[in-house]
Structures are given as C-alpha cells and as structure tokens.
C-alpha cells in the first residue's frame, strides 16, 4: 500500500512545479461562503418570509373588510325590502295604496343611495354635461338652447367624479 500511495504522490510532485509556474491556471481553493455571507443569506430568507406573511395578512384583511362593507350595504337595504314585502301583502286589498307604497319605497331606496354618496340626478333644463349625462337622443329644441337636457330617460346616480351611472337624457339639438 505504501508503494501505491507513493505512486500517487509522485505525479502530484511532478505537476506541482507546473502549477506554481502558472498561478493563473491554479483553481482557487473552495472554502464555502463566509459566516457574514451565511448571515446575510439567512436575513434575506427571513425578510422574504416576513414580506410574504405581511402580504398574506393584508390580503386576508382586505377580504374581511370587503365582506364587512358588503354586509353593511346589504343591511341598509333590508328596510327597503321589508317595505316592498308590506306593499305586496296589501296589493289585493287596495291597488291604489300599493302604488303609493311602491313610490314611498322607491323614495326610501333613493335616500339610501344618497346617504351612501350617490344622489339621484334627473335635472332637466340644464346644459348637457358628458361627465354626468349620456345622450340617448337629440331632438329639435324649439325655444331651448341647443345642448339643453329636455328629458331624463333614466336617472343617474352620483357626482361626475364618483358615480354609479350617468343619467340617460334627451338633448335639444339645432332646429
């Protein structure tokens, strides 16, 4: 065995002068990452895990807030539904009262939307505003200035910067 290991050491001795003659050909000794590098890698992994946990927590909180907001909005409309139920119960006994009841419930629903920041918009005689109106028809205006809202086909809700929908209107055109 000694001879065998001596044979292995002999070629190393022969190549050693050649390697020392060309230092750039010598491979650097691999010592692995330093303690500082390992600590930085560990801190990076922890920071990334913390960031992922924060992201997941924010997603859960956002989903909970959305669900809570939907529940608050639905709760505001429950009295409207209750009043519609009452109107339907009395539909057979007095049809005229049903019309008045439905009108009252509609007014209640409009008030709820207004309280939420989406006031009903159904003005006529005002200048057409593309931010608040959607023209569905243009008709001769007669004595009205061109571009004046003559009739509201479907009311709009909200202001131009925050609206559920624009009002659908008929606009005066040039005669």
Image (cartoon, rainbow, N blue to C red):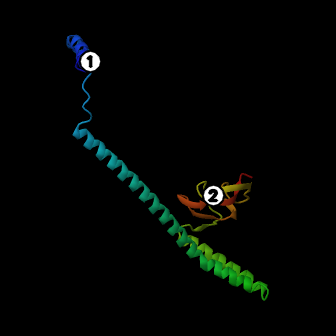
87 or 173, which is in the foreground?
Answer: 87
19 or 154, which is in the foreground?
Answer: 19
Q: As drawn, is 102 to the left or to the right of 41?
A: right
- The residue at which mark 1 appears reads as 4
- In the figure, residue 7 lies in which quadrant? top left
Vertical placement of residue 109 versus 58, above or below: below
Q: For numbered disc 1, what is the local secondary structure?
A: helix
Measuring from the top left, give residue 160's x and y in whole percent. Answer: 55, 58
Q: In what quadrant of the picture does the N terminus appear? A: top left
Measuring from the top left, give residue 25's x and y in whole percent. Answer: 27, 15
Going 57% across and 68% down the picture, which residue do you hit? 119
Vertical placement of residue 161 versus 13, above or below: below
Going 64% across and 81% down the picture, which residue do you hit? 82
How would you rate the neighbour count of disc 1 (Cα within 10 Å): few for under 14, some for 14-19, many for 20 or more?
A: few
How would you rate the neighbour count of disc 2 (Cα within 10 Å): few for under 14, some for 14-19, many for 20 or more?
A: many
Measuring from the top left, give residue 16's x and y in whole percent. Answer: 21, 14
- The circle drawn on residue 109 is none
- In the figure, residue 136 lies in which quadrant? bottom right
- The residue at which mark 2 appears reads as 133
Vertical placement of residue 124 versus 23, above or below: below
Q: For numbered disc 2, what is the local secondary structure?
A: strand
């Amino acid at each position: 065995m000694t001879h065998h290991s001596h044979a292995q050491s002999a070629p190393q001795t022969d190549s050693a002068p050649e390697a020392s003659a060309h230092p750039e050909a010598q491979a650097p000794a691999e010592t692995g990452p330093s303690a500082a590098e390992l600590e930085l890698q560990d801190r990076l992994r922890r920071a990334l895990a913390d960031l992922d946990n924060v992201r997941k927590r924010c997603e859960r909180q956002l989903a909970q807030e959305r669900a809570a907001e939907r529940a608050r909005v639905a709760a505001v409309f429950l009295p409207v539904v209750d009043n519609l139920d009452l109107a339907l119960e009395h539909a057979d006994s007095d049809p005229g009262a049903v019309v008045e009841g439905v009108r009252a419930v509609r007014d209640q629903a409009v008030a709820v939307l207004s309280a939420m920041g989406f006031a009903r918009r159904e003005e006529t005689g005002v200048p057409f505003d593309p931010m608040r109106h959607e023209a569905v028809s243009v008709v001769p205006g007669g004595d009205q200035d061109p571009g004046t809202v003559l009739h509201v086909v479907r009311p709009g809700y909200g202001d131009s910067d925050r609206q559920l929908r624009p009002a659908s209107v008929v606009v005066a055109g040039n005669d």
